[in-house]
Image (cartoon, helix red, strand yellow):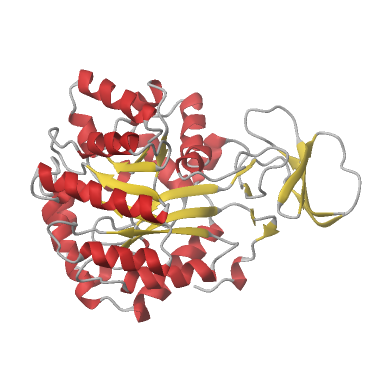
Amino acid sequence: MYDILIKNAQLRRKAGLWNIAIEKGIVQKITKKPVRGKAGKVIDAGGNLVTESFVNTHLHLCKVYTLEMMDSLALRAYHGADMGGAMTAIELAARVKANYNEKWILPNVRKALKLAAINGNLHIRAFADVDSKAKLIGLKALLKARNEFKGIVDVQVVAFPQDGVVREPGTVDLMKEAMDLGADVVGGIPWIEFTEKDEQTHIDEMMKLAVGYNKDISMLVDDAGDATLKTLEMLAVRTLEEGRVGRSLAHHARAMCLYPTPYFKKIAALLRQAGMGVVSDPHTGPLHARVKELLEEGNLVCLGQDDISDAYYPYGQNNMLEVAFLASHLLWMTTYPEMETLYDLVTVNPAKCINLPKFELKEKANANLVVLDAKSVCEAFRYHKAPLHVISHGKLIKAADLRG
Ligand SMILES: [Zn+2]
């Protein structure tokens, strides 16, 4: 007796049609032969593609749908062609935090997480601003939402000192409180400090927290049009010094696109040594990390949603097929093999970036999967429609039952 049996499924990089049997949250069987035994629910995939569910390693979840509360000053500063005003944008965007209140944050968060569930985006690393303005208001809202959506959309909450650590006195203590409240990941944004010495202090302080609480690190590094920014390198070095290979993740690193090639190659090698992946969101800024070249160098890379309708980006619906569709244009990855790579960048690669166990779709894997409304990856990107069925932890998701 199985919980769910999916019939007539196409699988990526495999010929023919397959049956997938799920029981107790685990993919028990993937076979071309008819599956013996009964199933509580039978889904006929009708030749559509069945894959791992989607993973989003970068979302500013406490700020979703705040665009309407803002003017467009921050957006204009962040999206200026050379990204010279990126720091100004962050300062302008911080104004929304003067009004932070769980009463409006939590409904917004639920709305975004319900969309994630509908779109089969079942694992999200979500940033909550922690600073003198936001205090712990956003973080507490995300912790609540994490518990509400547990087993449907798994949220990892990042305590994120968006406005700096050295330039924002009191942040270290707030960050400690955030970790005590149960945040899953230590965040950081070292490039925003005023001097290189302060950037190093920022990284060191957050590393101390991560080691003390035994948590992974996710830092937004070098997110401006300035090739001399070095916080990506600094984080990789510090990670190696602490012997924490595979426990730091770099986000944005947009300055990378301006690096001279010899420095780029050196950084790529350093990142591989530190087991550090790079999350790129090419649709949310005019510059982006060198995704294709990193892949050629054998580095771990994935794509993130970054923002949903906030001061930095006006669109977004927690749909990773949409993110991949946009990236296909912005990175000029439009051949069939490149589409397959892009699909990895929103499924198995981000899963590796945030250390999700048994994620790849095979027997004995955790049963987090989607039955797409498409027969190929190309078709999936072309229409970027929500999946026909979403299975989270071995259970079929019913969108109507979700809050949001
Ligand atoms: Zn971001």
In the shown orientation, is residue 378 left or right of residue 96? right
Residue 265's quadrant in the figure? top left
In the shown orientation, is residue 182 left or right of residue 237? right
Is residue 287 visible from the viewing direction of this image?
Answer: no
Residue 259's quadrant in the figure? top left
Q: What x and y, as percent, mark residue 140?
A: 38, 72
Residue drawn where x is 33% and y is 56% of the image: 307
Q: In this view, which residue lies farthest toward the right?
A: 37
Instruction: Report the front residue among 83 and 25.
Output: 25
Q: In this view, which residue lies farthest toward the top?
A: 262
Residue drawn where x is 20% and y is 50% of the image: 202
**Count of numbered tags:** 0
Q: In this view, which residue lies farthest toward the left?
A: 195
Note whether 168 is above or below 357 in the view shown: below
Is residue 171 visible from the viewing direction of this image?
Answer: yes
Q: What x and y, as percent, mark residue 62?
A: 34, 66
Q: What x and y, as percent, mark residue 378?
A: 53, 35
| Quadrant location, the N terminus | bottom right
Q: What x and y, as percent, mark residue 141?
A: 39, 72
